[in-house]
Image (spheres, rainbow, N blue to C red):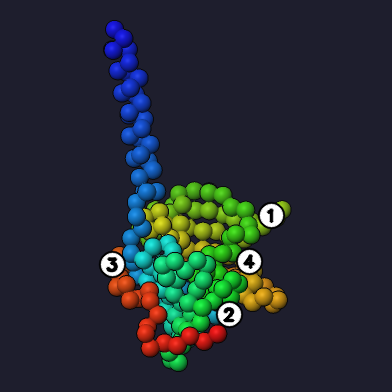
Amino acid sequence: MKIKTLISPLILFLGLLALMFSINARAFTKAPTFTADLVIKGADKTTHGKLFNKDPYIRRLEMSAESGGMIFLKPDGARGKIWMLDPVKKQYRILSYPETHLDPLEAWHEIQYEMEGSFTVEETLDGHPCAVYQFKYPGKDKTTLKVWQAEDLHFPIKKIADAKIVVKKGDSPIAVKGTFQIINIKLEKLDESLFEVPADYTEVK
């Protein structure tokens, strides 16, 4: 009798445990590598770039010629720094905070850290299941940032913002305003050399 009494609670526990792992499975899956186009639409200009994303912390962003032509690298072990490459001069600079915000991906990512945010709803955007978050500045009622975080990519694929961020020490904050979108996403294997500074580039301070 004691054995039978123990079996039912054990089965129930194992069933609940399996359900918990099933619900949270996506949270433990490794982010896929992908390429995509970045489009940032502001009030007076549109910025374009090509994104190569290895994981949430390792990436390469190539800006179009019309958007400055720079390349921004966030390699493995970057520790808060960004490598800004000039392919015309074959030079690079290592950017520290807050100049890391010269990289538009970094700027649009870090504006949320001064805000208070919360999950609002689940939506599917361009075929990607997304958790949608809204952010506000402390003590303010206005939603200043809305983010669509693609759960399968572990990456935000759309943001709408009306915020400001500092780019250089001592300077006034600049506007981060408009719509940020990652489009034309293609899952594919990426060459490790994409995330390295070419040997013929020289560092400038």
Task: Find disc 1 in the rendering and name its residue.
Answer: 138
Q: Is residue 187 left or right of residue 106?
A: left
Task: Find disc 4 in the rendering and name its residue.
Answer: 163
Q: Is residue 117 left or right of residue 170?
A: left
Q: Position of residue 2 (x, y in %)?
A: 31, 9
Q: CA distance from mark 2 to mark 4?
A: 16 Å
Choose the circle earlier in sequence order: 3 or 1: 1
Q: Are marks 2 and 4 in contact (CB under 8 Å)?
A: no
Q: Amino acid at mark 1?
A: Pro
Q: CA distance from mark 2 to mark 1?
A: 28 Å
Q: Which mark is residue 74?
A: none
Picture quarter with the C terminus: bottom right
Choose the circle earlier in sequence order: 4 or 1: 1
The image quarter containing residue 25 is top left
Q: Which mark is residue 188?
A: 3
| Label 1 residue SS | loop
Can you say whether 177 is above or below 131 in the image?
Answer: below
Spot the residue most to the bottom.
89
Q: Quick check: can you spot residue 51?
A: no
Q: Residue at x 55, y 70 (%)?
A: 107
Choose the circle earlier in sequence order: 3 or 2: 2
Q: Are marks 2 and 1 in contact (CB under 8 Å)?
A: no
Q: CA distance from mark 3 to mark 1?
A: 40 Å
Q: Amino acid at mark 2?
A: Asp
Picture quarter with the N terminus: top left
